[in-house]
Image (cartoon, helix red, strand yellow):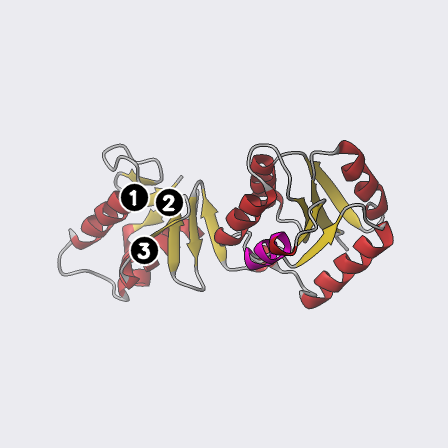
Amino acid sequence: MNMKKALIVDDEVNITELIKVNLEDRFQVKCCYNGLDAVKIAEEELPNIIILDIMLPGIDGFEVCRRIRKNPVTSKIPIIMLTVRKEENDKIVGLKLGGDDYITKPFSVNELLARIDAVLRRVPENDIKNRNIIKIGNIIIDNDKYEVTKNGRKIEFTLREFKLLQMLAKNRGNIVSRDMIIKEVWGCSKLNDSRTLDVHIRKLRKKLEDNDKFPEYIETVRGLGYMIK
């Protein structure tokens, strides 16, 4: 059975080490010491729980929480905010931004462990990795919501365009023939206008690529079909 993952984010090394030592028998623990690294590691590692300090270099814990909640890939990861701030308003801000719990320093390790258990009981099967999402570079395809975002910005697609992108993404790295695409996306063996597929590919490129004349994502394999690299 795979151990759950925990991400500890605090610029005080002694704090991260204290928490790490007490979590290592139950979690694979990763530590980082600034906000930008926290956002990146959360997306790459998809931890089951994040212990997040508010006072961080770069971007603070409030901004880290906001970015994690905004990203469809990381939006469901439980976050416990850890800080020296005791003001009620700070707690309210943290919770409104999506923090699941809030604990102030100095803290009891046993209390922190109990709060972690309580948060994880509310999401007992923290199945972030099983969400029906495909990530390709800075593009996120949410197959449940039929949504596509790039750099956090939602891109509008017709249903057919979405199905075409979805098919290519699910076969990432493999050539998908024109016949397969037409059968899957249009539900027929042949299109009346052979240019219809090419037109849809061009539309996808215009919406996804930084420069559709030099596509980074959708490649034409002449004589065979298309593929997402």
**Residue that appears at 71% across and 62% down:** 119
- Sequence-earlier tag: 1 or 2: 2
Compare residues 51 and 188 and report the one nearer the observer: 51
Give the percent coordinates (x, y) of residue 142.
44, 57
Tag on residue 164? 3
- Measure the alpha-carbon separation of dots 1 and 2: 7 Å
Q: Which residue, given by chain and number where applicable, does mark 2 sit on?
A: 175
- Label 3 or label 2, whichever comes before in sequence order: 3
Image disc number at residue 224: 1
Which disc number belongs to residue 207?
A: none
Quadrant that contains the N terminus: bottom right
From the viewer's side, name the closer residue of 120 and 134: 120
64 in relation to 76, above or below: above
Compared across the picture, whether 30 is left or right of 159 comes to right
Image depth: mark 1 or mark 3 in front: 3
In magenta segment, residue 170: no
